Image (cartoon, grey):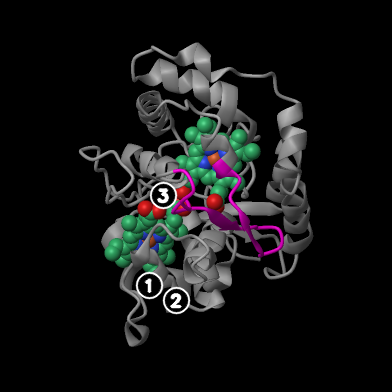
Amino acid sequence: MKRSYSLLLAGLAVVATVSGVAIAQQQKDTAKPAEPAKTETTQNTAMPDATVAAAMPLFDIKSVQGMEVGLERGRLIAVGVCAECHQADGNSTAPAWPKLAGQHEGYIAKQLYNFKAAEPGKNALRQNMVDVTDGKAKTSTMAAQVARLSADPKEFDKDVQSLAMWFASQKNNSPDVAKNEDTVGLGQSIYRGGVMSKGVPACAGCHGPTGQGMFNASKLGAGANAFPMVSGQFSDYMVAQLQAFREDVRGNSPIMSDIAKRMTDNEIKAVSDYMAGKRLNANAVAPAVAPASTEPKPAAPAKP
Ligand code: HEC
Ligand code: HEC
Protein backbone atom coordinates (compact mmCIF):
# COMPACT_ATOMS: atom_id res chain seq x y z
CA MET A 1 0.00 0.00 0.00
CA LYS A 2 2.71 2.40 1.00
CA ARG A 3 4.60 1.69 -2.19
CA SER A 4 1.73 2.43 -4.55
CA TYR A 5 0.97 5.61 -2.66
CA SER A 6 4.48 6.86 -3.20
CA LEU A 7 4.20 5.84 -6.86
CA LEU A 8 1.23 8.13 -7.12
CA LEU A 9 3.15 10.85 -5.38
CA ALA A 10 6.19 10.30 -7.54
CA GLY A 11 4.13 11.55 -10.46
CA LEU A 12 3.55 14.83 -8.74
CA ALA A 13 6.39 17.17 -9.28
CA VAL A 14 6.00 20.29 -7.25
CA VAL A 15 3.94 21.70 -4.45
CA ALA A 16 2.72 25.24 -4.46
CA THR A 17 0.90 27.14 -1.78
CA VAL A 18 -2.01 29.23 -2.93
CA SER A 19 -3.99 30.80 -0.13
CA GLY A 20 -2.98 28.09 2.29
CA VAL A 21 -3.70 25.26 -0.10
CA ALA A 22 -0.99 22.83 -1.04
CA ILE A 23 -1.33 21.94 -4.69
CA ALA A 24 0.47 19.20 -6.49
CA GLN A 25 1.32 20.28 -10.01
CA GLN A 26 1.72 17.69 -12.68
CA GLN A 27 4.89 18.03 -14.69
CA LYS A 28 3.07 18.68 -17.97
CA ASP A 29 -0.37 18.25 -19.51
CA THR A 30 -2.01 18.74 -16.15
CA ALA A 31 -5.18 16.78 -16.69
CA LYS A 32 -4.30 13.24 -17.74
CA PRO A 33 -1.07 11.88 -16.23
CA ALA A 34 -2.50 11.42 -12.75
CA GLU A 35 -5.06 8.85 -13.88
CA PRO A 36 -3.15 5.56 -14.17
CA ALA A 37 -1.43 5.95 -10.81
CA LYS A 38 -4.73 6.84 -9.21
CA THR A 39 -6.41 3.74 -10.56
CA GLU A 40 -3.64 1.62 -9.17
CA THR A 41 -4.04 3.11 -5.72
CA THR A 42 -7.76 2.60 -5.80
CA GLN A 43 -7.43 -1.01 -6.88
CA ASN A 44 -5.07 -1.74 -4.07
CA THR A 45 -7.45 -0.27 -1.52
CA ALA A 46 -9.93 -2.91 -2.61
CA MET A 47 -7.90 -5.51 -0.76
CA PRO A 48 -10.49 -7.55 1.11
CA ASP A 49 -10.50 -6.76 4.82
CA ALA A 50 -10.26 -10.47 5.58
CA THR A 51 -6.85 -10.60 3.90
CA VAL A 52 -5.64 -7.72 6.01
CA ALA A 53 -7.12 -9.19 9.16
CA ALA A 54 -5.55 -12.58 8.55
CA ALA A 55 -2.11 -11.01 8.61
CA MET A 56 -2.64 -9.47 12.06
CA PRO A 57 -2.05 -11.16 15.39
CA LEU A 58 -5.20 -11.58 17.41
CA PHE A 59 -6.03 -8.91 19.94
CA ASP A 60 -8.26 -9.64 22.91
CA ILE A 61 -10.30 -6.63 24.04
CA LYS A 62 -10.48 -8.23 27.49
CA SER A 63 -6.85 -7.23 27.97
CA VAL A 64 -7.90 -3.57 28.47
CA GLN A 65 -10.92 -4.19 30.72
CA GLY A 66 -10.58 -2.33 34.00
CA MET A 67 -8.02 0.14 32.62
CA GLU A 68 -8.86 3.81 33.09
CA VAL A 69 -9.98 6.03 30.21
CA GLY A 70 -6.81 7.47 28.74
CA LEU A 71 -4.15 7.50 26.07
CA GLU A 72 -2.68 4.12 27.06
CA ARG A 73 -5.97 2.27 26.75
CA GLY A 74 -6.57 4.05 23.44
CA ARG A 75 -3.11 3.23 22.14
CA LEU A 76 -3.42 -0.47 22.99
CA ILE A 77 -6.72 -0.82 21.12
CA ALA A 78 -5.41 1.29 18.23
CA VAL A 79 -2.42 -1.01 17.83
CA GLY A 80 -4.49 -4.16 18.30
CA VAL A 81 -7.55 -3.32 16.20
CA CYS A 82 -7.39 -0.08 14.21
CA ALA A 83 -3.81 -0.12 12.94
CA GLU A 84 -4.44 -2.59 10.14
CA CYS A 85 -6.38 0.08 8.27
CA HIS A 86 -5.81 3.48 9.91
CA GLN A 87 -2.23 2.88 11.15
CA ALA A 88 -1.64 2.99 14.89
CA ASP A 89 -1.13 6.77 14.80
CA GLY A 90 -4.10 7.43 12.50
CA ASN A 91 -2.00 8.38 9.47
CA SER A 92 -3.75 6.01 7.07
CA THR A 93 -1.98 5.43 3.79
CA ALA A 94 -4.91 4.84 1.40
CA PRO A 95 -7.97 6.97 0.64
CA ALA A 96 -10.42 4.17 1.49
CA TRP A 97 -9.41 4.58 5.12
CA PRO A 98 -9.82 8.10 6.49
CA LYS A 99 -7.05 9.73 8.46
CA LEU A 100 -7.83 9.95 12.14
CA ALA A 101 -4.64 11.66 13.31
CA GLY A 102 -5.44 15.07 14.76
CA GLN A 103 -9.19 14.70 14.19
CA HIS A 104 -11.35 16.14 16.99
CA GLU A 105 -12.08 13.94 19.94
CA GLY A 106 -15.81 14.75 19.97
CA TYR A 107 -16.14 13.92 16.29
CA ILE A 108 -14.26 10.61 16.52
CA ALA A 109 -16.33 9.53 19.51
CA LYS A 110 -19.60 10.46 17.79
CA GLN A 111 -18.69 8.41 14.73
CA LEU A 112 -17.82 5.34 16.81
CA TYR A 113 -21.21 5.55 18.54
CA ASN A 114 -22.93 6.12 15.18
CA PHE A 115 -21.32 3.02 13.65
CA LYS A 116 -22.98 0.91 16.33
CA ALA A 117 -26.73 0.34 16.56
CA ALA A 118 -28.10 2.14 19.64
CA GLU A 119 -30.23 -0.90 20.46
CA PRO A 120 -30.01 -4.48 19.24
CA GLY A 121 -32.15 -4.97 16.15
CA LYS A 122 -32.05 -1.27 15.24
CA ASN A 123 -30.06 0.18 12.37
CA ALA A 124 -26.87 2.09 13.10
CA LEU A 125 -27.02 5.76 12.10
CA ARG A 126 -23.85 5.44 10.04
CA GLN A 127 -24.48 1.98 8.72
CA ASN A 128 -23.56 2.19 5.06
CA MET A 129 -20.82 3.67 2.96
CA VAL A 130 -20.01 4.42 -0.66
CA ASP A 131 -17.18 2.18 -1.78
CA VAL A 132 -14.47 4.47 -3.15
CA THR A 133 -13.45 1.81 -5.66
CA ASP A 134 -16.79 1.36 -7.45
CA GLY A 135 -19.10 4.08 -6.06
CA LYS A 136 -21.63 1.52 -4.86
CA ALA A 137 -23.28 1.42 -1.45
CA LYS A 138 -22.30 -1.35 0.95
CA THR A 139 -22.30 -2.05 4.67
CA SER A 140 -19.68 0.05 6.38
CA THR A 141 -16.50 -1.78 7.26
CA MET A 142 -16.64 -0.02 10.61
CA ALA A 143 -19.68 -1.99 11.80
CA ALA A 144 -17.46 -5.02 12.29
CA GLN A 145 -14.77 -2.90 13.97
CA VAL A 146 -16.97 -1.41 16.69
CA ALA A 147 -18.26 -4.93 17.28
CA ARG A 148 -14.70 -5.87 18.29
CA LEU A 149 -14.78 -3.33 21.16
CA SER A 150 -16.07 -4.19 24.65
CA ALA A 151 -19.54 -5.69 24.81
CA ASP A 152 -20.30 -4.18 28.21
CA PRO A 153 -21.74 -0.66 27.58
CA LYS A 154 -19.65 1.03 30.29
CA GLU A 155 -16.44 -0.56 29.04
CA PHE A 156 -17.49 0.34 25.47
CA ASP A 157 -17.76 4.01 26.51
CA LYS A 158 -14.25 3.80 27.95
CA ASP A 159 -12.93 2.21 24.75
CA VAL A 160 -14.52 4.95 22.62
CA GLN A 161 -13.31 7.82 24.79
CA SER A 162 -9.80 6.42 25.01
CA LEU A 163 -9.61 5.86 21.24
CA ALA A 164 -10.92 9.37 20.53
CA MET A 165 -8.34 10.79 22.91
CA TRP A 166 -5.53 8.76 21.36
CA PHE A 167 -6.18 9.63 17.71
CA ALA A 168 -6.94 13.29 18.50
CA SER A 169 -3.54 13.56 20.16
CA GLN A 170 -1.69 12.30 17.08
CA LYS A 171 -0.39 14.56 14.34
CA ASN A 172 -1.42 14.31 10.69
CA ASN A 173 2.07 13.97 9.24
CA SER A 174 1.05 13.03 5.68
CA PRO A 175 -1.63 15.52 4.63
CA ASP A 176 -3.16 15.09 1.20
CA VAL A 177 -2.68 17.75 -1.47
CA ALA A 178 -4.99 19.37 -4.01
CA LYS A 179 -4.32 17.56 -7.28
CA ASN A 180 -6.49 19.34 -9.79
CA GLU A 181 -5.28 22.84 -10.49
CA ASP A 182 -8.17 23.48 -12.86
CA THR A 183 -10.79 23.15 -10.14
CA VAL A 184 -8.98 24.71 -7.17
CA GLY A 185 -10.63 28.08 -7.91
CA LEU A 186 -14.12 26.54 -7.92
CA GLY A 187 -13.30 24.53 -4.80
CA GLN A 188 -12.09 27.61 -2.99
CA SER A 189 -15.12 29.65 -3.95
CA ILE A 190 -17.51 26.93 -2.70
CA TYR A 191 -15.51 26.45 0.47
CA ARG A 192 -15.41 30.13 1.32
CA GLY A 193 -18.72 31.36 -0.08
CA GLY A 194 -20.90 28.34 -0.84
CA VAL A 195 -23.07 28.32 -3.96
CA MET A 196 -25.51 31.10 -3.26
CA SER A 197 -27.94 30.43 -6.11
CA LYS A 198 -28.52 26.88 -4.81
CA GLY A 199 -28.54 27.58 -1.10
CA VAL A 200 -25.25 25.77 -0.46
CA PRO A 201 -23.70 27.43 2.62
CA ALA A 202 -20.03 28.25 2.95
CA CYS A 203 -18.21 25.20 4.24
CA ALA A 204 -15.85 27.50 6.13
CA GLY A 205 -18.76 28.56 8.34
CA CYS A 206 -18.65 25.22 10.14
CA HIS A 207 -15.37 23.60 9.10
CA GLY A 208 -13.41 26.78 9.77
CA PRO A 209 -11.37 29.07 7.52
CA THR A 210 -8.41 26.68 7.52
CA GLY A 211 -10.44 23.47 7.54
CA GLN A 212 -9.64 22.81 11.19
CA GLY A 213 -13.24 22.10 12.14
CA MET A 214 -14.38 22.96 15.61
CA PHE A 215 -13.16 21.73 18.93
CA ASN A 216 -15.95 20.72 21.28
CA ALA A 217 -14.63 18.34 23.89
CA SER A 218 -17.39 19.39 26.24
CA LYS A 219 -19.70 16.82 24.71
CA LEU A 220 -18.78 13.24 23.97
CA GLY A 221 -21.64 11.18 22.69
CA ALA A 222 -23.71 9.89 19.81
CA GLY A 223 -25.42 13.25 19.33
CA ALA A 224 -22.44 15.57 19.79
CA ASN A 225 -22.45 18.60 17.53
CA ALA A 226 -19.00 17.98 16.14
CA PHE A 227 -17.52 19.74 13.11
CA PRO A 228 -14.73 17.56 11.75
CA MET A 229 -11.37 18.75 10.54
CA VAL A 230 -11.33 18.42 6.74
CA SER A 231 -7.90 19.85 5.90
CA GLY A 232 -5.35 17.22 5.00
CA GLN A 233 -7.94 14.43 4.69
CA PHE A 234 -7.92 12.25 1.55
CA SER A 235 -9.95 13.95 -1.18
CA ASP A 236 -11.28 10.62 -2.52
CA TYR A 237 -12.58 9.77 0.93
CA MET A 238 -14.35 13.13 1.22
CA VAL A 239 -15.91 12.74 -2.25
CA ALA A 240 -17.26 9.34 -1.17
CA GLN A 241 -18.65 10.82 2.07
CA LEU A 242 -20.34 13.76 0.34
CA GLN A 243 -21.91 11.35 -2.17
CA ALA A 244 -22.98 9.10 0.71
CA PHE A 245 -24.61 12.06 2.49
CA ARG A 246 -26.32 13.09 -0.75
CA GLU A 247 -27.74 9.62 -1.48
CA ASP A 248 -28.71 9.10 2.20
CA VAL A 249 -26.28 6.21 2.35
CA ARG A 250 -24.57 7.87 5.34
CA GLY A 251 -27.46 8.83 7.61
CA ASN A 252 -25.87 10.44 10.67
CA SER A 253 -25.98 14.09 9.66
CA PRO A 254 -29.18 15.70 8.32
CA ILE A 255 -27.24 18.97 7.93
CA MET A 256 -24.63 17.46 5.63
CA SER A 257 -27.22 15.46 3.68
CA ASP A 258 -29.16 18.63 3.00
CA ILE A 259 -26.03 20.44 1.84
CA ALA A 260 -24.79 17.57 -0.35
CA LYS A 261 -28.18 17.18 -2.07
CA ARG A 262 -27.69 20.67 -3.51
CA MET A 263 -24.31 19.83 -5.02
CA THR A 264 -23.27 18.29 -8.34
CA ASP A 265 -20.53 15.67 -8.62
CA ASN A 266 -18.34 18.30 -10.18
CA GLU A 267 -18.77 20.66 -7.22
CA ILE A 268 -18.22 17.83 -4.74
CA LYS A 269 -14.97 16.83 -6.43
CA ALA A 270 -13.72 20.40 -6.69
CA VAL A 271 -14.35 21.28 -3.05
CA SER A 272 -12.97 17.95 -1.79
CA ASP A 273 -9.77 18.39 -3.78
CA TYR A 274 -9.43 21.90 -2.39
CA MET A 275 -10.09 20.85 1.22
CA ALA A 276 -7.54 18.05 1.00
CA GLY A 277 -4.85 20.61 0.22
CA LYS A 278 -5.81 23.05 2.94
CA ARG A 279 -3.21 23.58 5.63
CA LEU A 280 -3.92 24.49 9.21
CA ASN A 281 -1.22 27.13 9.08
CA ALA A 282 -2.22 29.06 5.99
CA ASN A 283 1.06 30.94 5.88
CA ALA A 284 3.28 27.91 6.07
CA VAL A 285 5.22 26.93 3.00
CA ALA A 286 3.83 23.59 1.87
CA PRO A 287 6.07 20.64 2.68
CA ALA A 288 7.50 18.37 0.01
CA VAL A 289 4.70 16.27 -1.31
CA ALA A 290 6.07 12.75 -0.96
CA PRO A 291 6.16 11.63 2.66
CA ALA A 292 8.94 9.24 1.67
CA SER A 293 11.21 12.12 0.68
CA THR A 294 13.19 13.57 3.54
CA GLU A 295 14.38 16.80 1.91
CA PRO A 296 11.88 19.63 1.86
CA LYS A 297 11.65 21.12 -1.62
CA PRO A 298 11.27 24.83 -2.24
CA ALA A 299 7.73 25.77 -3.16
CA ALA A 300 6.33 26.89 -6.47
CA PRO A 301 8.71 27.13 -9.41
CA ALA A 302 7.08 28.55 -12.54
CA LYS A 303 4.57 26.42 -14.44
CA PRO A 304 5.96 24.66 -17.51
C1 HEC B 1 -10.70 -3.23 8.23
C2 HEC B 1 -10.36 -1.83 8.09
C3 HEC B 1 -10.66 -0.93 9.29
C4 HEC B 1 -10.32 -1.12 10.61
C5 HEC B 1 -9.57 -2.28 11.22
C6 HEC B 1 -10.78 0.05 11.32
N1 HEC B 1 -11.38 0.92 10.43
FE1 HEC B 1 -12.18 2.74 10.91
N2 HEC B 1 -12.73 3.00 8.96
C7 HEC B 1 -12.56 2.08 7.96
C8 HEC B 1 -13.26 2.53 6.77
C9 HEC B 1 -13.35 1.80 5.45
C10 HEC B 1 -13.88 3.75 7.12
C11 HEC B 1 -14.84 4.59 6.26
C12 HEC B 1 -16.19 4.04 6.67
C13 HEC B 1 -17.43 4.60 6.06
O1 HEC B 1 -17.36 5.44 5.17
O2 HEC B 1 -18.51 4.16 6.50
C14 HEC B 1 -13.52 4.02 8.50
C15 HEC B 1 -13.94 5.15 9.20
C16 HEC B 1 -13.63 5.40 10.52
C17 HEC B 1 -14.01 6.60 11.24
C18 HEC B 1 -14.76 7.79 10.67
C19 HEC B 1 -13.74 8.84 10.26
C20 HEC B 1 -14.34 10.08 9.67
O3 HEC B 1 -13.56 10.95 9.25
O4 HEC B 1 -15.57 10.21 9.63
C21 HEC B 1 -13.52 6.49 12.51
C22 HEC B 1 -13.65 7.49 13.64
C23 HEC B 1 -12.84 5.21 12.58
N3 HEC B 1 -12.93 4.58 11.36
C24 HEC B 1 -12.23 4.72 13.72
C25 HEC B 1 -11.67 3.44 13.81
C26 HEC B 1 -11.18 2.90 15.04
C27 HEC B 1 -11.13 3.66 16.37
C28 HEC B 1 -10.75 1.63 14.76
C29 HEC B 1 -10.22 0.62 15.73
C30 HEC B 1 -11.07 0.30 16.87
C31 HEC B 1 -10.99 1.39 13.35
N4 HEC B 1 -11.55 2.52 12.81
C32 HEC B 1 -10.67 0.22 12.68
C33 HEC B 1 -11.82 0.91 8.04
C34 HEC B 1 -11.33 0.35 9.20
C1 HEC C 1 -23.91 24.01 9.32
C2 HEC C 1 -22.61 23.44 9.51
C3 HEC C 1 -21.92 22.80 8.32
C4 HEC C 1 -21.69 23.34 7.08
C5 HEC C 1 -22.10 24.70 6.56
C6 HEC C 1 -20.92 22.35 6.35
N1 HEC C 1 -20.70 21.25 7.11
FE1 HEC C 1 -19.72 19.56 6.56
N2 HEC C 1 -20.11 18.70 8.35
C7 HEC C 1 -20.81 19.32 9.38
C8 HEC C 1 -20.96 18.39 10.48
C9 HEC C 1 -21.67 18.66 11.81
C10 HEC C 1 -20.33 17.18 10.08
C11 HEC C 1 -20.19 15.90 10.89
C12 HEC C 1 -21.36 15.01 10.64
C13 HEC C 1 -21.36 13.81 11.55
O1 HEC C 1 -21.53 13.99 12.74
O2 HEC C 1 -21.11 12.72 11.07
C14 HEC C 1 -19.80 17.42 8.74
C15 HEC C 1 -19.12 16.48 7.99
C16 HEC C 1 -18.56 16.72 6.76
C17 HEC C 1 -17.74 15.78 6.01
C18 HEC C 1 -17.36 14.37 6.45
C19 HEC C 1 -15.99 14.37 7.08
C20 HEC C 1 -15.49 13.02 7.46
O3 HEC C 1 -14.39 12.93 8.01
O4 HEC C 1 -16.16 12.01 7.19
C21 HEC C 1 -17.38 16.40 4.85
C22 HEC C 1 -16.50 15.83 3.75
C23 HEC C 1 -17.97 17.72 4.86
N3 HEC C 1 -18.68 17.88 6.02
C24 HEC C 1 -17.84 18.64 3.83
C25 HEC C 1 -18.50 19.86 3.79
C26 HEC C 1 -18.51 20.74 2.64
C27 HEC C 1 -17.79 20.48 1.34
C28 HEC C 1 -19.27 21.83 2.97
C29 HEC C 1 -19.60 23.03 2.11
C30 HEC C 1 -20.23 22.78 0.84
C31 HEC C 1 -19.73 21.61 4.34
N4 HEC C 1 -19.25 20.41 4.80
C32 HEC C 1 -20.52 22.51 5.04
C33 HEC C 1 -21.30 20.61 9.41
C34 HEC C 1 -21.30 21.47 8.33
Q: Which residue is mark 3?
A: 279
Q: Are marks 2 and 3 in contact (CB under 8 Å)?
A: no
**Is residue 128 found inside the magenta-colored segment of the image?**
yes
The crowding category of the residue bearing disc 2, from other C-alpha atoms within 10 Å (few below 14, some 14 to 19, many at least 20), is some
Disc on res. 82 = none
Residue 113 placement, left or right of 133? left
For the stretch drawn in magenta, the main secondary structure is: loop
Left or right? Give the position of 159 relative to 213: right
Which residue is identified by label 2?
261
Q: Amino acid at mark 2?
A: Lys
For this view, does 184 lie left or right of residue 281? right
* Marks 1 and 2 close (CB-CB < 8 Å): yes
Identify the secondary structure beneath mark 2: helix
Mark 2 Cβ and ligand 2 under 8 Å apart:
no
Residue sticking out furthest to the front: 121
Which residue is found at the position 46% from the left and 70% from the top? 187
Badge 1: few (under 14), some or many (20 or more) residues near its Cα, within 10 Å?
some
Query: Distance of mark 2 from mark 3, alpha carbons?
Result: 27 Å
Tell me which corner region of the image, top left, top right, bottom left or bottom right, holds residue 132.
bottom right
Tell me the residue at 37%/39% (across/down). Answer: 109
Please name the residue shown 44% across and 14% down the image.
Answer: 65
Q: Alpha carbon of mark 3 to alpha carbon of mark 1: how far?
A: 27 Å
Q: Which residues are magenta?
A: 120-143
Please tell me whether mark 2 or mark 3 is closer to you in this view.
2
Disc 3 marks a residue whose amino acid type is Arg
Report whether residue 286 is seen: no
Of 85 and 143, the residue lying toward us: 143
**Can residue 4 be seen from the camera position used here?**
yes
Report the residue marked by disc 1: 258
Q: Mark 3 and 1 residues: CB-CB less than 8 Å, in contact?
A: no
* Relative vertical location of residue 54 with respect to residue 50 in this rendering, above or below: above
Spot occupied by residue 275 in the image (x, y as percentages of width and height): 45, 58
